[in-house]
Image (spheres, helix red, strand yellow):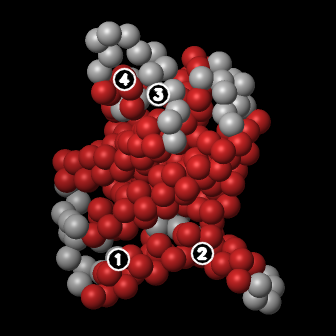
Amino acid sequence: MRHKLSIIFTELKTHAPFTLFGTFTGIVLMLVFRNLQQDTSHRMFYVFHPAHVVLSAMVTASVFELHTKRRKFIAVLLVGFFGSLGVATLSDSLIPYIGELLLGMHVHVHAHEHTSFAEHAHIGFIESWYIVIPAAVAGVLIAYFRPKTKFPHAGHVLLSTWASSFHMLMATGGQLSVLKAVGSFGFLFLAVWLPCCISDIVFPLLFVKSPIDPSHIHDQKLSQNCHSFGRLRTGSERSEGSD
């Protein structure tokens, strides 16, 4: 248990610098597209959110399959399916929605008298289940047949950031102030940093007995890049060249 906690904290620390970079890209997107129509932001959200679900399901299912003797399809499907939908919803919808409420953004984008919470918060597997649920299944199928495929974790982080960014853009009503953009930065960081590590590491660990090998989650080059970001932030010497 102590070993697993050590891995979790190490991965959180390792991914923080790259997540910070991803958050900057999300804020840039929000500023560049601050006048985007709400319907267009909604469509863009349902491009990045399902893509995030696919990659999340791939990682979660692969990690589970690589570290357990229970290679039955139903077990891999359940872990990858619920892990990806749960974490992607938290990352792309719920945390941004909380941020929108606290920042005083106009959250009732498509609201009418009988609008449900799922529509207000844009819960993908409910609001657009016909897109998001097949995306989760597709990710599990890819992982089931090729669980050893190295996963570019950077893509996972960026897709989640951009989905969260367009979620928050939907709530601005085309009027994003500098103050709200600054406030959005913290929520975007949290929306990606904790959920993505939970999806890739913590959730699969709940279902396996053997220790997890982080090299099965993201490749060595990305790990070096993450540490390089950390060195740049602390003013350390330039990192060694990549392979």
Looking at the rendered image, the disc whose residue lies closer to the viewer, 4 or 1, is: 4
Q: CA distance from mark 3 to mark 2?
A: 37 Å
Of callouts 1 and 3, the N-terminal one: 3
Q: Is residue 31 above or below residue 73?
A: above
Give the residue number, with chain letter if any, for mark 4: 119
18 left or right of 2 in image: right
Q: Element at badge 1?
A: loop
Coordinates of residue 23 in the picture (x, y in percent): 63, 54
Q: Is residue 194 left or right of residue 186?
A: left
Neighbour class for label 2 at 10 Å: few (<14), some, many (≥20)? Answer: some
Residue name at image x 60 percent, y 23 percent = 173
Q: Which residue is mark 1?
A: 212
Give the label on residue 223, or none: 2
Disc sitting over residue 240 in the figure? none
| Cβ atoms at labels 4 and 2 below 8 Å apart | no
- Crowding around mark 3 (Cα neighbors within 10 Å: few <14, some 14 to 19, many 20+) is many
**Residue, x 55% and y 56% (percent of image)?**
186
With 232 as the anchor, is 131 left or right in this view?
left
Spatial separation of the CA atoms under disc 1 and disc 3: 40 Å
> What residue type is disc 2 on?
Ser
Q: CA distance from mark 2 to mark 1?
A: 16 Å
Q: CA distance from mark 4 to mark 1?
A: 37 Å
Q: Element at badge 2?
A: helix
Q: Is residue 107 above or below residue 76?
A: above
According to the picture, the residue beneath numbered tag 3 turns out to be 107
Q: Earlier in the sequence, mark 2 or mark 1?
A: 1
Foreground residue among 197 and 174 = 174
